[in-house]
Amino acid sequence: QKEVEQNSGPLSVPEGAIASLNCTYSDRGSQSFFWYRQYSGKSPELIMFIYSNGDKEDGRFTAQLNKASQYVSLLIRDSQPSDSATYLCAVDGAGSYQLTFGKGTKLSVIP
Amino acid sequence: NAGVTQTPKFQVLKTGQSMTLQCAQDMNHNSMYWYRQDPGMGLRLIYYSASEGTTDKGEVPNGYNVSRLNKREFSLRLESAAPSQTSVYFCASRDGQGPYEQYFGPGTRLTVT
C-alpha cells in the first residue's frame, strides 16, 4: 500500500512569514510529486509539481524534492490570509496512472 | 472550455436507493478518476479509467460501479446507497502517467439518510 504522510496541522503562521509544509512518501519508485490547494467547500487545484531532485520555484511558492529521503516540501513565502487552505501532497507511482494523496495540512495565515 | 463538470452538485438519498453521478471533461484527457473525500480521511480513489474502454478499482471500490461511456464521460453508480457512502465525490481527469496535472470537477455532496 503506497502511503503519503502529511502533518494534519493546523499550521498557523503570521502574515508575511514563510509557511513550510512537509510530505513523506513510501514508494521509492515514485516519479512525480504534486502540491494541491483546497479551499473549504471547493475542489483541489494544482499549485505546482516537481519531478527532479532539488528546488522548483513559482512566484511565492517553492517545492523541494529529496528522493533519497523520500521527502517533498512546499514553502510559501510572504504568506497571505488568502493562502489559508488545506494543502494536499500527491505522489505518482512508477508506471501508475494513480495519484496517491496525503490527508492534507490545514494552513491558517493570521493577519 | 468548461474543464471537468459533474452533476448533480447536491443529492440526498434514502438508504437503498440508487443513483448515478455524471462526469464529463472537455480537455481530451485519456484518464479519468472518481474520488470520495471524508473529514480526516483525505481523498480516496474509488475507481479510475486509464483510457477509454478500461476501468480499474481504486482503494475503496465496494458499493460502487463505474462506466467509461466514451473518452469524455465517466459515471459512478451507487446501486443501493448506504449511510457510509455519505461523502463529497470528486471526478478528475488527467492526460496520462507522469508529470501531468490532474484536474478536478466541482464535486457532488451526497447525503444518505
Image: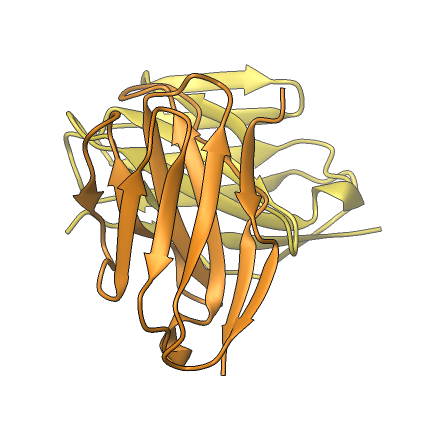
Compare residues A109 and B95 and report the one nearer the observer: B95
x and y percentages locating residue B70 in the rendered image: 33, 27
Chain with orange colouring:
B
In the displayed structure, B14 sits above or below A66; it is below
Residue A102: tell me if it is visible.
no
- Quadrant in the rendering for residue A30: top left
Taking the image as shown, residue A101 lies to the left or right of residue A62, namely left
Q: Is residue A111 left or right of residue B82?
A: right
In this view of the protein, which residue sits in the foreground, B96 or A11? Answer: B96
| Residue shown at 46% from the left, 45% from the top | B22
Query: Where residue A39 appears, x then y in whole percent?
Result: 65, 49
Which image quarter: residue A62?
A: top right
Task: Check the image and report above or below for B78 versus A38.
Answer: below
Q: Quadrant of residue B96?
A: top left
Q: Is residue B60 visible?
A: yes
Q: Which chain is yellow?
A: A
Instruction: Residue at 37% x, 73% y: name it.
Output: B81
Residue B97 image offset from top left, x and y in percent: 26, 22
Does B27 appear above or below A111? above
Residue drawn at x 72%, y 38% is A79
List x then y, in percent, for residue A5.
33, 52
What colour-coding does the image apply? by chain
- Locate the N terminus of chain B and report the quarter of the image it occupies: top right
Q: Is residue B39 left or right of residue B55?
A: right
Count of numbered badges drawn on the protein = 0
Q: Is residue B5 left or right of residue B23?
A: right
Rendered residue at 78%/46% (across/down): A81
In front here: A33 or A18?
A33
Question: Viewer-proximal residue, B59 or B83?
Answer: B83
